[in-house]
Amino acid sequence: MRQTELLCAGGRSVALAGAILALAGCAAGCSGRAASTESESAPNQQAGVLANRDWWDAFYMGDARVGYTHTTTRTTMWHGRPAIELAVENRLVLERFGQKTTQEVTTTAHETPAGQLLDLRNETRVAQAPIVLTAKVVGSELRVETTASGQARQTAIPWSTDIGGLMAVERSLLEKPLRPGEKRSVRLVMPMLDQVVLATNHLEAGDYETTEMPSGPVELLRVTSRVELPGGGITSTIWLNRQGETLKTRIDALGMQSFRTTKEVALGKPEAASFDLGYDTVVRLARPLENPRAGRLARYRVTLKQGDPAAVFPHGPTQEVHAEDAHTALLTVRAVRPGEPVKASADAAPTAADREPNSLIQSDNARVTELAREAVGDETDPVKVAIALERFVHERIRKKNFSQALATAAEVAKNLEGDCTEHAVLLAALARAKGIPARVAIGLVYIPSEQGFGYHMWNELYLDGAWIPMDATIGRGGIGADHLKLAQSNLQAAGALTCFLPVAKVMGQLGIELIESE
């Protein structure tokens, strides 16, 4: 059935949208210390421009309004000292293969009047159970606790007084608006799903131009914003008025835009979607790929309108990449099955993060370990265990749907439903529970009913000294030559969302030509 085929593809677009939504806020809502190319100033000692603010932004995909951001600030007391309280509410309703999926992210934080972070709380709802992150500055550390599916995990990251609060970018832009041609960089601390990460936001102002707003054309300053994160970055364009307020943002990777608006517009009923994150991101072929799941080898010509595909698609046991020109590469993809010899690769050996539980892959969860025992019984041979686990996940997740975007392994083990992401996090958790290093792979898979490639997640398990791909959504023991890999991740800390950044580099501009298959 057409729907069954699609249920295992395209889910990563939703997670990407969530990552981009978080990054979009960096241009007007993250913390750090702003440094101009001309001068560098100390943090302001007064609340000033940030005191008691309230604004709304509406998000659009194409012509359809799909969500909003509501931001408020107020002066308050925090443990007996003056402070600024920030509250940000994000809501995004997206269409995926004809079904709606909702993402909600709420953040509250306290900072000093000078703009230094005191504490924060971030709650992300992309599945049935929320992921809650709290952080507090204690001396030279930011102590972070993440709670997902009832399990709490603690981490700490180095901290220093030159890292500001979540409103440092607004503070910088409002107190000293950018001028045409000016460059400015901001160090950031960002709550992202299950962890706080450090990043740098580079701002480069162009010139004032007439740009379209919902109310009509307005003259605004065009600024290129690039947020650098561990593992990659994302570029957007923002438009500022002469007071330094961000009135418009465009994120090219998904064709998403936001506009400053009123509460009534932002909270209005979401409009009929003109863009479907599933169907409209499929990269279609001129001719079909025959016998895709069982094919042993296929060669593709991949092109990017901007960028070099040879720098985006990685080399590994399943694929080789050779550049033809600056925007074209030949991609040779080979089927790999567990227990078969694989071509030598320089791929890294597993690390502790590929073996240990984390906030998304809870391999120490009681239900996960129970399912792992049920799946393999007394079997100890790693290859046979891997095959049994893949088959088990494929057979046990019977309720396939698009309503979830990034459920944790513990949640999947409990509910046994979801799409490709849920298959992948559960298989990774079961494998780690049985002592097999495991990670997820992100890329594209061929969808026969669409005659094209959709964005997808599967797994890689470390067997016999090599990372072997496994795909529980298909359940055939390994993969055919129909999987095009973009990245891999152990889903620890920042990797939980930044691993999707390579998708942002290709989405909307990738072309694939089938040359041959066998």
Image (cartoon, helix red, strand yellow):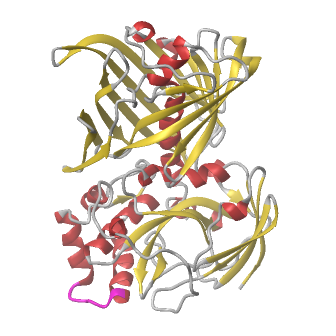
User: Relative to 448, does residue 402 appear above or below in the rendering?
Assistant: above
Residue at (51, 19) in percent of width and height? 172
Residue 412: name its quadrant: bottom left
Span highlighted in magenta in the image: 377-382
Q: Nearer the viewer, residue 4 or 473?
A: 473
Determine the residue positioned at 38% across, 78% down. Answer: 391
Q: Which quadrant of the view contains residue 221?
A: top right
Q: Quadrant of residue 434?
A: bottom left
- Residue 117 placement (x, y as % from top left): 33, 27
Q: Tell me if residue 291 comes above or below residue 125 in the rendering.
A: below
Q: Is residue 93 visible?
A: no
Is residue 171 shown above or below 422?
Answer: above
Q: Quadrant for the C terminus, please.
A: bottom right
Locate residue 342, reporting x and y percent: 55, 88
| Residue 380 falls within the magenta-colored stretch | yes
Main secondary structure found in the magenta portion: loop
Q: Residue at x 74, y 58 (%)?
A: 308
Q: Is residue 189 left or right of residue 202?
A: left
Visible in this render: residue 348? Answer: yes
Residue 440 spot, x, y in % from top left: 45, 65
Q: State the residue at coordinates (42%, 88%).
A: 464
Judge from the rendering whether residue 364 lies leftward or rightward of residue 109; answer left or right.
Answer: left
Is 461 placed above or below 111 here? below
